[in-house]
């Protein structure tokens, strides 16, 4: 599985867009990019995933570069409740019986009033 | 219903106690997971069940014993734990073969 690199921490003003980058320069063709977040002392929450095309859902947008070596998670209007650790994970969709997610250290996002 | 529930929320136990953590989901998912998470660290996979059969055991000590009585329930039986086993224990479920996992709120375990 490709390794991901994320900044340790970021700050964002409430109401502004939060753009969280992730580098995955060794990603291979069948590997998806997944984003999860974990609000303090809660279980992780699935946000979004994508392969090549940009994706959007009610929570966020995922922008994947054309060479797929990096991606950005965008929270369009960050609120205080978006303060959390955000994990970028790369995983092959059909890796047989192994459904193990390889978690990095993530980015700690602080949304400030 | 897109919720995974876990009980209890908090558990304090001595090293000689036997206790169990419980997890339940009603999303029809056939894969269920146990994770352990220490403070300021990412979750670590412990066990994966697929169609009620244990498919992955990440070399977890035998003092942790998982059980999947049916497709909706997952238990983690605890016995003779050590203080270093104190952590947040997370349960998750997913469709078979998928990586979109839905997590419960966790059980905060303290071993004295």
Image (tube, coloured by chain):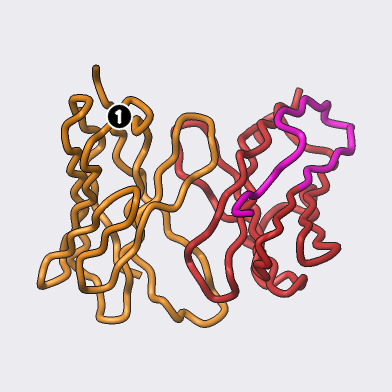
Chain colours: A orange, B red
Quadrant for residue A82, please give it: top left
**Which residue was labeled with disc 1?**
A79
Residue A16 position within the rendered picture, expressed as x and y whole percent measured from the top left: 16, 32
Q: As rendered, which of A18 and B21 lies closer to the eye?
A: A18
Query: Counting other residues with Cα less than 10 Å from the Cα at mark 1, is it few (<14), some (14-19), or many (20 or more)?
Result: some
Residue B104 position within the rendered picture, expressed as x and y whole percent measured from the top left: 62, 45
Write the start and end of the magenta stretch as one range.
Answer: B1-22
Q: As rendered, which of A25 and B21 lies closer to the eye?
A: B21
Q: Residue at x 76, y 38 (%)?
A: B7
Numbered disc 1: secondary structure: loop
Answer with left or right where residue B23 lies relative to residue B45: right
Residue B108 position within the rendered picture, expressed as x and y whole percent measured from the top left: 66, 31
Judge whether B7 appears above or below B58 on screen.
Answer: above
Looking at the image, the residue that sits furthest to the left is A66
Magenta-span inclusion, residue B82: no
Chain letter belonging to callout 1: A
Quadrant for residue B78, please give it: top right
Q: Residue at x 83, y 48 (%)?
A: B77
Q: As rendered, which of B9 and A56 lies closer to the eye?
A: A56
Quadrant for residue A13, please give it: top left
């Amino acid at each position: 599985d490709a390794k991901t690199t994320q900044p340790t921490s970021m700050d964002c003003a409430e109401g502004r867009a939060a753009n969280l980058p992730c580098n995955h320069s060794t990603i291979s063709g069948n590997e998806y990019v997944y984003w999860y977040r974990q609000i303090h002392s809660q279980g992780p929450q699935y946000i979004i995933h994508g392969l090549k095309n940009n994706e959007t859902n009610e929570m966020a947008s995922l922008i994947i570069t054309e060479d797929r070596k990096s991606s950005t998670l965008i929270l369009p209007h960050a609120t205080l409740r978006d303060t959390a650790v955000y994990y970028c994970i790369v995983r092959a969709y059909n890796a047989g019986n192994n459904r193990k997610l390889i978690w990095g250290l993530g980015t700690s996002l602080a949304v400030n009033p | 219903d897109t919720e995974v529930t876990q009980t209890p929320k908090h558990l304090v136990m001595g090293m000689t106690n036997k206790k169990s953590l419980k997890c339940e989901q009603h999303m029809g998912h056939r894969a269920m997971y146990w994770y352990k998470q220490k403070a300021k660290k990412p979750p670590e996979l412990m066990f994966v069940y697929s169609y009620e059969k244990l498919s992955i055991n990440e070399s977890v000590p035998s003092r942790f014993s998982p059980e999947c009585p049916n497709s909706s329930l997952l238990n983690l039986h605890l016995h003779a734990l050590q203080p270093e086993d104190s952590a947040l224990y997370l349960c998750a479920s997913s469709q078979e073969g998928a990586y979109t996992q839905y997590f419960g709120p966790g059980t905060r375990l303290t071993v004295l």
